Amino acid sequence: MPLSRVVSLLQFIAFGFIGTVIVTSFIEWAVHRFVMHRPVGKFDYPFKAHAVVHHGIFRGDESYHLQNEKDKETIPMAWWNGPLLIAICATPGSLVAWFLGHGSIAIGAWVAAGAYYATYEYLHWCMQLPRKRGLERSGVFFRLNGHHILHHRYMHKNFNVVFPLADLCLGTLLLRSKIAFPQPVHPAVPDLQPLEEKPALPVRVWRFVSLCLTGVK
Ligand SMILES: [Zn+2]
Ligand SMILES: [Zn+2]
């Protein structure tokens, strides 16, 4: 196969991969918000398993980290969610591939959908069950962990676990709590408490002058 053909194939695969990661952020957000946090008619299994059981056990305080071994099984999704969600997330890219007549876009889409789902399950497992893994020392994990703790504290915020693009675009991104709360303390957990508000400028000037005159803070 000529080199130019290989480069073109890789470009289409990369297009399918990147496009699917972006689309999957929005699918993750929608599934989490509309299927896992509310019953869909009689189909209430994801709502019960996630919003009732998972959120009931793991909250935004120290219970965010596994307290009872028996609760381990409530961290991952049911096995059949994997193939179903991967197929859903790979569908838009596969349709684009079919429409444009470039099957390699579909390859990128399926690889991205599978990788996104595997990343979701592994990140979520490590977040709620920390074990001093190398991954837990990374800055990306640190930030995403804080993002997910705030979701356990405020269930209507931070629906993404892997790639919070949809949270950013759809107005559900929360970087810090607006009020102080008893958050979990762990090396892989950032400070999520509200930033202390600076006093107004005249107050700071007055404090400075008074410090210079009296030497007392
Ligand atoms: Zn949730
Ligand atoms: Zn969780």
Image (cartoon, rainbow, N blue to C red):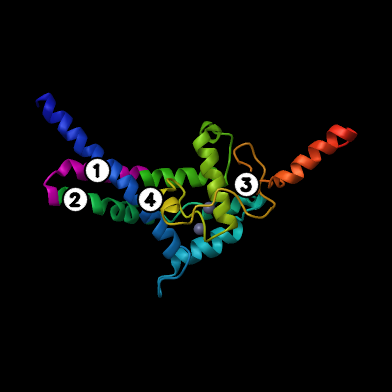
Magenta span includes 109: yes
Which label is found at residue 192? 3
User: Could one spot residue 48 in this view of the protein?
Assistant: yes
When asked about the image quadrant of residue 133, the answer is top right
Give, as a three-letter code, the residue at label 2.
Answer: Val
At label 3, counting other C-alpha atoms closer than 10 Å, the crowd grade (few under 14, some 14-19, many 20 or more) is many
* Circle 2 residue: 96
* Circle 4 residue: 25
- Secondary structure beneath dot 3 equals loop
Q: Is residue 154 above or below residue 97?
A: below
Of marks 3 and 2, the one in the foreground: 3
At label 2, counting other C-alpha atoms closer than 10 Å, the crowd grade (few under 14, some 14-19, many 20 or more) is some
**Mark 1 vs mark 3: which is more N-terminal?**
1
Q: Foreground residue, 91 or 140?
A: 140
**Mark 4 vs mark 2: which is more N-terminal?**
4
Magenta span includes 168: no
- Secondary structure beneath dot 1 equals helix
Q: For marks 4 and 2, give the CA distance.
A: 18 Å
**Mark 2 vs mark 1: which is more N-terminal?**
1
| Contact? badges 2 and 1 (CB < 8 Å) | yes
The C terminus sits in image quarter:
top right
**Mark 1 vs mark 4: which is more N-terminal?**
1
Seen in the image, is 9 located left or right of residue 76? left
Q: Which residues are magenta?
A: 99-115
* Circle 1 residue: 16
Image spot of residue 127 (x, y percent): 54, 44
Image spot of residue 45 (x, y percent): 44, 66
